[in-house]
Image (cartoon, rainbow, N blue to C red):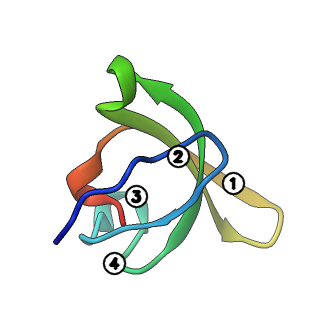
């Protein structure tokens, strides 16, 4: 798989399940912060109507 640059406000999808956060492979979120020079990201996911999950520090390998 070819890695591409992830930018602020990009829509990304998980490539792995994160069941402990009720997030699953394929779930889309929005990049809201670039960390460590773009090596990791803070991503927000909508998990239910009126509920927002904000998760930090995802390596690019867990996002597509």
What residue occupies the far right of the structure in this picture?
A: 50
The residue singled out by tag 1 in the image is 52
Is the residue marked by circle 2 packed among few (<14), some (14-19), or many (20+) residues within 10 Å? many
Residue at 61% over, 39% down: 8
Mark 4 → mark 3, Cα distance in angstroms: 12 Å
Q: Earlier in the sequence, mark 1 or mark 2?
A: 2
Task: Give the distance between the C-alpha atoms of the residues marked 4 and 2, in whole angstroms.
Answer: 14 Å
Does residue 9 appear left or right of residue 56 in this picture? right
Per the model, the C-alpha gap separating discs 2 and 3 is: 13 Å
Mark 4 highlights which residue? Answer: 25
Across and down, in percent, residue 41 comes to: 43, 37
- The kind of secondary structure element at disc 4 is loop
Tell me if residue 9 comes above or below residue 63 in the rendering: above
**Residue 56 seen anywhere in this rendered image of the structure:** no
Disc 3 target residue: 21
Secondary structure category for the residue under label 2: strand
Q: Nearer the viewer, mark 2 or mark 3?
A: 2
Can you tell which mark lies on residue 43?
2
Please state the total of marks drawn on the protein image: 4
Answer above or below: position of 44 versus 56.
below
């Amino acid at each position: 798989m070819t890695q591409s640059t992830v930018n602020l406000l990009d829509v990304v999808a998980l490539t792995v399940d994160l069941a402990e956060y009720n997030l699953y492979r394929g779930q889309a979120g929005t990049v809201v912060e670039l960390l460590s020079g773009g090596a990791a990201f803070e991503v927000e996911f909508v998990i239910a109507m009126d509920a927002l999950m904000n998760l930090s520090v995802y390596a690019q390998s867990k996002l597509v």
